[in-house]
Each structure stands twice: as C-alpha cells, then as structure tokens.
C-alpha cells in the first residue's frame, strides 16, 4: 500500500461555497504542495482529512484506513500544523508539551528537546508570550516529535522569517529521507514548494484544477511575453490567461500551443508556481 492519502469524489456543501467532487492521492516518500487562492478550498480539504469537518459525500483513506471510523489510530501517525494556534495560552511550552505528549504512542522527548534548541523555544516561556512565528515553531516541534508518518502542514511558514523558512525546508527534506513518510504542505508561499515539493495539487473554486509532478507541470506551461498587437481574438482564445499593459502582454499557455507564436517575435520563459496559480485562478 503506497498511498498514504487517498481522496475520492469528496464533496462538502456550505452556504455560498462547495468543495466539488475532489480527487487526489499522495504516495509514501513524497512531498505534495497544495496551492490555490484564498477561499479555494485548501483549509476545508485539510479539515475534512483530519475529520474536523464532516463530508457530504466521497471517501477519505489515510494509511489505507477510513479517516472517520479509524480516526484515533490515524491521528497517532499524523503530525498536524495549523495556521492558527490552539494551545492553552496560560501554560508554558514545557507544560503544554506534557499535556500533548501522552496522546502519541511514539512520542520522543529527546527529539522534542532537540527541536526546541533548533527553534529557540524556551521551556519556561508561556504560550501567550510567544510571537506568532514562535508559536508556529512550537507547533512544528510538536508535529515533528512523535515520528509521524504523515505531516499535514497548513500554512506552516506563516509569520516565519526567510532564514528560518529556509532552515525548515532543510528539516522537511531530512524528514522525507525516510521513504515511509510523506508531507502534505499547503501554503501561499509557492517559492517554498519550488524548493522541496515533488507533486503539486492546485485547487480553485472548490475544484481540483490539476494534480501532477511539479517538474512535469512546470515543463508543460510557458510564459509568453511580446507586443500587444500580436494578440488577435484567435490567439487569445488559445491562452490560459493574459495580462496587457502599454508595454505589451504577458500570458500563460500550454507548451503544445506555443507554436501559435512561431511567426512573431516573443520572449518565452519557464513559469513559476505563483505565475501558474495567478493565471489559472482568473
């Protein structure tokens, strides 16, 4: 069984929004970046995986088990980092850890102490006195200290400075060296995913736009730049998104459509994940 996460035809209805029949899976030993604009359905999907919301239809399997009926066994094997802090603010780092640790069968105090040193977490410091970034470091230390086979990270780099974000990417790379582990990493900072993700799943308006290998995706699209006079209606219809200004245009297109510019003088570039997300969200 290679699939650590397997989501099939999952839907969730809200007033004014629907997570619409989504499908994707994550195999052992890989990092998947989960991207999309605000309100696209990323956090809803993660809450459904964690059984913090009840789905209307579909199946969610984690480690081959049903995420509802086998919730306790599954969560023992998951390290979860959410964007908001849900710790008892009046407790110290040490006391909060002592409350959380017994819930995990493979908790490792030595590993937690090691991450506290790496992250600069002081055991006697109260949670309420930690900055947003330091609370995130505490969440990460907890998630990384019980030998989790699946890390689910929802905006884990929120509030973190670029130097620490780079250090965190190194830590996540080390975690994934154990090919039995996987990471589902939801973030707006797509440059982080370009460094470490193996796969990218893009969600928009509650629907999966694509889920594929990162390198393959980046090879399948091109950014085209040129004079705006080139843009006939016929050409625009072949593009996935266009920005125009007085200096010209910039557009995203599939590689196989690139030939429509063969007779024109244009500049072609490999897109970033952020550019892909911006154009495909419009």
Image (cartoon, rainbow, N blue to C red):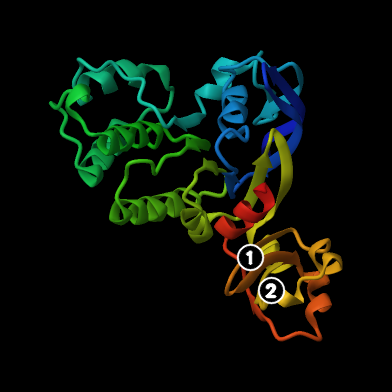
Q: Residues within 10 Å of mark 1 (few under 14, many from 20)?
A: some
Image location of residue 267, percent across then percent down: 64, 81
Quadrant location of the N terminus in the rendered image: top right
Name the residue at the right extreme. Answer: 234
Residue 230: name its quadrant.
Answer: bottom right
Q: CA distance from mark 2 to mark 1?
A: 7 Å
Residue with the mark numbered 2: 228
Residue 41 in the figure: left or right of residue 122:
right
Asked if the residues shown at circle 2 and circle 1 are in contact, with their CB atoms under 8 angstroms apart, the answer is yes
Residue 174 shows in the view: yes
Q: Residues within 10 Å of mark 2 (few under 14, many from 20)?
A: some
Q: Earlier in the sequence, mark 2 or mark 1?
A: 2
Q: Residue at x 41, y 17 (%)?
A: 103
Q: Residue at x 62, y 32 (%)?
A: 41
SS under mark 1: strand
In this rendering, the answer to whether 43 lies above or below 240 is above
Front-most of 107 and 256? 256
Residue 1 shows in the view: no
Name the residue at the left extreme. Answer: 124
Image location of residue 73, percent across then percent down: 56, 19
Residue 50 in the figure: left or right of residue 238:
left
Residue with the mark numbered 1: 244
| Mark number, residue 27 | none
Image location of residue 155, percent across then percent down: 45, 39
Front-most of 129 and 2? 129
Image location of residue 33, percent across then percent down: 57, 47
Residue 83: name its quadrant.
Answer: top left
In this rendering, the answer to whether 14 lies above or below 171 is above
Front-most of 183 and 10? 10
């Amino acid at each position: 069984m290679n699939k650590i996460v397997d989501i099939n035809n999952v839907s969730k209805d809200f007033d004014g929004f629907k997570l619409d029949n989504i499908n994707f899976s994550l195999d052992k030993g890989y990092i998947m970046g989960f991207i999309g604009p605000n309100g696209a359905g990323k956090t809803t999907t993660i809450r459904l995986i964690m059984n913090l919301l009840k789905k209307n239809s579909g199946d969610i399997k984690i480690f081959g088990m049903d995420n509802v009926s086998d919730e306790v066994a599954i969560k023992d094997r998951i390290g979860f980092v959410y964007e908001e802090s849900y710790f008892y603010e009046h407790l110290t780092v040490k006391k909060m850890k002592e409350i959380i640790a017994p819930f995990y069968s493979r908790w490792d105090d030595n590993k937690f102490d090691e991450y506290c040193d790496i992250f600069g977490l002081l055991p006697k410091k109260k949670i309420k006195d930690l900055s947003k970034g330091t609370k995130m470091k505490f969440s990460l230390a907890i998630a990384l200290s019980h030998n989790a086979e699946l890390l689910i990270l929802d905006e884990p780099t929120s509030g973190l400075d670029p130097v620490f974000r780079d250090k965190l990417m190194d830590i996540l790379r080390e975690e994934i060296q154990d090919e039995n582990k996987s990471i589902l990493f939801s973030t707006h900072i797509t440059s982080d995913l370009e460094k470490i993700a193996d796969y990218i799943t893009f969600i928009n308006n509650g629907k999966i736009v694509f889920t594929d290998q990162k390198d393959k995706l980046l090879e399948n699209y091109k950014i085209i730049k040129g004079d705006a006079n080139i843009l006939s209606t016929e050409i625009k219809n072949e593009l996935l998104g266009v920005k125009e200004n007085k200096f010209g245009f910039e557009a995203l297109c599939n590689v196989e459509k690139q030939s429509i510019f063969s007779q024109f003088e244009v500049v072609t570039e490999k897109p970033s994940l952020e550019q892909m997300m911006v154009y495909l969200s419009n």
